[in-house]
């Protein structure tokens, strides 16, 4: 009701409410009332959600009341999946309510008729705003909002968000000119407190692992006792593995399914439909189900492995019982003892209503380039007016004239110091400050390549009859050979052959390999890390822990030390003729990976003969042939200057960031499905472009964009810097004669974990060749 | 550079893809694809206009290190037949300096058939050196020892969870395919059926590391 009042007053609003509070309908109520009172043709309300599936779901949920009331309101979706004839018709005769995604909206704005299409627009509703405002898709949407506001100055903006730590930051994001006073805050009913617990089979928490696999039978029991259960896993590979584990102990053959982002669209839709109809007892899933579709009767949510953040946990748990008066039920299955502490920390954070910190960063330049080109495709523009419009988008409020100019030059000719491409320009300045595209082909090219999500190159996994099961990354596919078995789409599959961009498979019953996907792992948030540190330093809290966790900490305290919250504990000890250094830095897996590389490099220089390192979210272990008597120089602050920059420039981190900015920024075209070349490849590797650019024009706009991405979005760099800064003052070194309890979770993954322990690629190749020779020797 | 023998001759292989033939005082490279970036720029993809410069700088460095007198480019030296006309000034100067001091042969490829040569060197369809045939694309029907380019072979392996991808040589007793040398040239999987068909059943990928050549059999 409050949303209606805001609407009558013509006010923009941000509605913050728990999942299941009927946010979406609340967002639409004013539109329905308005159109019921004054029926009108023309686009009245735009709804933007981060997921295509959500748009479809909302359409279904809206149509029912509209039909029941017999209102003359058309509600349609427009996403990448919409057939082109319908898209064309929507531009000529738009529905009153259009449900779409940030990408599709940006594309609509690239057409010359966008000015008439949106001229009567009254309201834009942005759903799940918390899920993407701080990402590049949020940048794109924010820029589109500014454009829409320029077309219709009295546009009302409505944001819908799950519970967030800092609602005012989202009000600012949503408001024109970042003026939060223009957006009213409406807080929904918080609903019942969730019931959360930690599952510990037989009171034992394992030393290592991070999947909670050991608890398969107990998880199956829980599924048995509940009507419907969602089982969240932290990676796609783990989801497949857990599904197999559960299937093995599924004695009553309960219907269970698996769902993740790399499965074929139809397969996902089928599973979702089965879930909605109550035909599944459990669904093993990943972040692919963090958002969206409302299923009503999920009774229990199980989180396999550590939750990594309290907001994420709360949102996942909120998927159970989408009714406000009933508490959601959730269970965490920690993978090891550190994860137990993390799970306990997450539950405490939920109790204290402490949410994950949210960092807003300035708008990205590749997204800006894409948006400016979209604007140019719609109509010629005045440079000064466009800059004003762009600055009214919160993420770009601080955009300088100089950077804006560089982005224009970049779009026009690539923005190189060597002005080689003037004759091929895409944008031309007709008269001072007045720009237009040079030819219609530029607009066609833009519309084909626009978009914010950049996948790694993927191959389709299909049965021989052509049915697609899903996709795996090219990098992983290249390691498969005919006859290999993989766990995928809930099946064991035998690879039959490779055909163009397809992997043909058949079902099999054999043990199989896990499919792996590249990219970063999710790291534990800083506030959970702080809570875990606080546990270590507070023995009075330990009575809450299971016996084996408590004993683990007690023995650690006697044999070595438990770090105080402001201490960086470093242990050194010999073990099986090697010398180990374990550092309990709690900065997350990603930061630890970077640090491991840097430290092993330093050890090499210092003659300590490093052999490798392993890391988890909590600590890092480095090992070598010589004892480390003084760890301090290995971590001195100057590591961040020379070695760090050099290392980042050569790392996959920056190359991956560069690939993304090169595609989003329109430097290279996307590979379009079906157009993939066989035989000789036409596509070029952005790694090669990166290498050339780094050498000849390291200050180029896209290099700047890639660095900014690496710095701001991949928070690990910041965490790494803080860690190193801390090290000088806070390091406490304990040398012991043998391995300590807290080191064990790391020690057991040495040799087992697939991590490339600092070894150079050359070394890996040499080992691989030796292995092949060994295997092929005929004696 | 690591020692490598093929068809009874001794070579030194460079990880970037140049093959040094000390007995002939020659250097062999394939698929420079000069001016690839400016070719794509015409189509609205503004790749960095420094690819020719990068490729030629790398080539100059190897020529100086190896101290060769002759140089053979095994085709697709330019990304298209007009590439030579588009060379930026600096790259052109580097190329002219190279062709002036070396006995330079351009073997023509499918990308640059009959390119107009303004930068020195001679143009040939194919060449024969000490009984070894040099051509752009391998000819499985020809039994003579042969060195070619065209396929840009790359070895891709997943090792201990890491994807390793390297330019590589692919060879058998009578066929050798060089990796692409160009700065912006991508790669084709060394195990691609087309490559194996051209090289024959005993095809293996060869990857130079610091001190030696690694050999990876390419199973069908």
Image (cartoon, coloured by chain):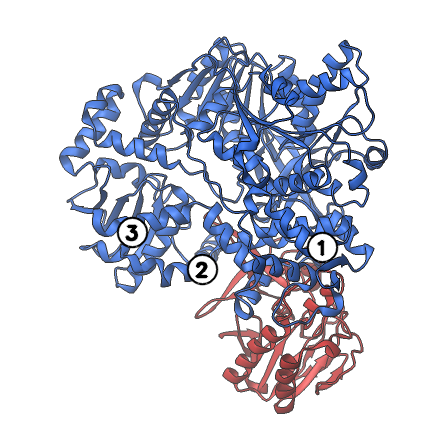
Q: Residues within 10 Å of mark 3 (few under 14, many from 20)?
A: some
**First-in-chain label (1 vs 2):** 1
Q: Do the residues under discs 3 and 2 have CB atoms within 8 angstroms?
A: no
Q: Which residue is mark 1?
A: A382
Q: Label 1 lies in what chain?
A: A
Residue depicted at x 53% and y 34%: A180
Q: Is residue A121 left or right of residue B57?
A: right
- Real-space Cα distance between discs 1 and 2? 59 Å
Q: Secondary structure at mark 3?
A: helix
Which chain wears blue? Answer: A
Report x, y in % for residue A491.
59, 29
Q: Which residue is mark 3?
A: A725
**First-in-chain label (3 vs 1):** 1
- Real-space Cα distance between discs 3 and 1? 47 Å
Q: Say which of A713 and A488 sits in front.
A: A713
Q: Say which of A458 and B137 sits in front.
A: A458
Work out whether disc 3 and disc 2 sit on a shared chain.
Answer: yes
Q: Do the residues under discs 3 and 1 have CB atoms within 8 angstroms?
A: no
Q: Residues within 10 Å of mark 2 (few under 14, many from 20)?
A: some
Q: Which residue is mark 2?
A: A766
Q: Secondary structure at mark 1?
A: strand
Residue depicted at x 60% and y 62%: A689
Report x, y in % for residue A764.
44, 56
Residue depicted at x 27% and y 21%: A545
Q: Residue furthest bottom?
A: B101
Q: Is residue A284 visible?
A: yes
Which chain wears red? Answer: B
> Against A55, is B212 above or below?
below
Q: Residues within 10 Å of mark 1 (few under 14, many from 20)?
A: some
> Against A314, is B27 above or below?
below
Q: Say which of A114 and A634 sits in front.
A: A114
Report x, y in % for residue A638.
31, 60
């Amino acid at each position: 009701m409050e949303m209606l009042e805001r609407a009558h007053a013509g006010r923009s609003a941000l509605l913050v409410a728990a999942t299941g509070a009927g946010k979406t309908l609340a967002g639409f109520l004013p539109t329905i009332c308005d159109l019921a009172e004054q029926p009108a043709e023309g686009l009245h309300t735009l709804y933007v959600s981060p997921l295509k599936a959500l748009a479809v779901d909302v359409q279904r949920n809206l149509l029912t009341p509209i039909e029941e009331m017999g209102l003359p309101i058309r509600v349609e979706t427009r996403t990448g999946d919409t057939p082109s004839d319908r898209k064309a018709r929507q531009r000529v005769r738009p529905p009153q309510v259009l449900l779409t995604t940030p990408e599709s909206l940006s594309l609509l704005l690239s057409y010359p008729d966008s000015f008439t299409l949106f001229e009567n627009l009254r309201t834009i509703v942005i759903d799940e705003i918390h899920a993407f405002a701080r990402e590049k898709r949020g940048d794109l949407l924010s820029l589109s909002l500014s454009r829409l506001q320029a077309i219709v100055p009295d546009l009302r903006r409505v944001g819908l968000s799950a519970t967030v730590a800092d609602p005012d930051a989202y009000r600012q994001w949503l408001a024109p000119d970042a003026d939060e006073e223009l957006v009213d805050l409406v807080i929904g009913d918080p609903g019942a407190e969730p019931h959360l617990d930690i599952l510990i089979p037989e009171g034992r928490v394992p030393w290592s692992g991070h999947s909670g696999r050991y608890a398969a039978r107990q998880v199956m029991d829980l599924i048995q006792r509940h009507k419907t259960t969602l089982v969240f896993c932290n990676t796609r590979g783990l989801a497949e593995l857990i599904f197999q584990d559960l299937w093995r102990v599924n004695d009553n053959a309960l219907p269970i399914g698996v769902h993740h982002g790399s499965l074929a669209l139809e397969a996902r839709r089928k599973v979702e439909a089965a879930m909605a109809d109550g035909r599944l007892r459990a669904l093993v899933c990943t972040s692919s189900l963090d958002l969206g579709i409302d299923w009503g009767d999920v009774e229990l949510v199980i989180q396999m492995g550590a939750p990594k953040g309290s907001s994420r946990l709360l949102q996942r748990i909120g998927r159970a019982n989408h009714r406000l008066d009933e508490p959601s039920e959730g269970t965490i299955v920690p993978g090891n003892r550190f994860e137990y502490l993390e799970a306990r920390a997450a539950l405490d954070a939920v109790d204290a209503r402490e949410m994950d910190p949210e960092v807003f960063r300035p708008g990205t330049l590749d997204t800006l380039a894409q948006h400016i080109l979209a604007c140019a495709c719609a109509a010629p523009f005045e440079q000064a007016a466009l800059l004003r419009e762009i600055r009214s988008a919160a993420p770009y409020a601080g955009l300088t004239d100089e950077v804006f100019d560089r982005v224009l030059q970049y779009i026009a000719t690539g923005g190189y110091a060597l002005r080689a491409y003037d004759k091929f320009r895409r944008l031309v300045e007709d008269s001072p400050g007045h720009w237009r595209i040079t030819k219609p082909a530029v607009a066609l090219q833009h519309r084909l390549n626009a978009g914010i999500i950049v996948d790694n190159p993927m191959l389709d996994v299909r049965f021989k009859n052509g049915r697609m099961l899903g996709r795996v990354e090219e990098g992983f596919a290249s390691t498969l050979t005919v006859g290999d078995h993989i766990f995928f789409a809930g099946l064991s599959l035998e690879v039959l052959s490779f055909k163009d961009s397809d992997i043909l498979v058949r079902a099999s019953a054999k043990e199989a390999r896990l499919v792996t996907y590249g990219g970063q792992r999710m790291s534990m948030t800083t506030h959970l890390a702080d809570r875990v540190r606080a546990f270590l330093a507070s023995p009075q809290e330990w009575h809450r822990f299971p016996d084996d966790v408590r004993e683990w900490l007690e023995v650690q305290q006697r044999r070595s030390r438990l770090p105080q919250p402001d201490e960086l504990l470093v242990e050194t000890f010999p073990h099986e003729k090697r010398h180990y250094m374990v550092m309990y830095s709690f900065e997350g897996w990603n930061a630890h990976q970077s640090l491991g590389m840097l430290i092993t490099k330093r050890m090499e220089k210092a003659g300590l003969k490093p052999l490798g390192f392993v890391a988890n979210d909590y600590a890092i272990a480095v090992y070598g042939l010589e004892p480390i008597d003084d760890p301090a120089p290995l971590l001195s602050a100057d590591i961040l200057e020379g070695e760090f920059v050099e290392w980042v420039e050569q790392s996959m981190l920056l190359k991956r960031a560069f690939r993304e900015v090169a595609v989003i920024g329109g430097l290279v075209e996307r590979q379009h499905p079906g157009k993939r070349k066989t035989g000789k490849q036409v596509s070029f590797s952005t790694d090669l472009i990166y290498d050339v650019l780094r050498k000849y024009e390291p200050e180029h706009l896209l290099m700047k964009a890639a660095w900014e991405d690496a710095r701001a979005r991949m928070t690990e760099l910041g965490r790494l810097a803080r860690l190193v800064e801390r090290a000088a003052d806070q390091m406490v070194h304990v040398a012991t004669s043998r391995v300590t309890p807290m080191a064990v979770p790391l020690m057991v993954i040495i040799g087992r974990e697939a991590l490339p322990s600092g070894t150079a690629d050359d070394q890996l190749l040499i080992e691989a060749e030796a292995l092949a020779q060994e295997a092929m020797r005929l004696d | 550079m690591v020692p490598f023998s093929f068809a009874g001759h001794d070579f030194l292989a460079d990880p970037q893809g140049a093959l040094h033939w000390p007995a002939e005082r020659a250097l062999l490279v394939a698929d420079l694809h000069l001016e690839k970036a400016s070719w794509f720029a015409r189509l609205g993809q503004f790749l960095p206009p420094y690819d020719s410069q990068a490729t030629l700088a790398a080539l100059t460095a190897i020529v100086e290190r190896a101290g060769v007198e002759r140089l053979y480019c095994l085709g697709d030296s330019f990304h298209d037949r007009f590439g030579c006309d588009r060379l930026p000034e600096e790259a052109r100067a580097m190329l002219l300096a190279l062709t002036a001091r070396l006995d330079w042969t351009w073997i023509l490829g499918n990308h640059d058939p009959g390119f107009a040569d303004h930068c020195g060197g001679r143009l040939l369809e194919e060449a024969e050196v000490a009984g070894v045939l040099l051509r752009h694309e391998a000819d499985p029907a020809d039994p003579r020892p042969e060195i070619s380019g065209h396929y840009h072979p790359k070895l891709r392996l997943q090792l201990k969870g890491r994807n390793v991808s390297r330019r590589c040589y692919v060879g058998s007793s009578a066929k050798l395919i060089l990796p692409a040398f160009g700065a912006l040239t991508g790669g084709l999987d060394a195990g691609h059926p087309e490559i194996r068909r051209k090289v024959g059943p005993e095809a293996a990928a060869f990857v130079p590391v610091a001190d030696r050549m690694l050999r990876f059999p390419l199973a069908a």
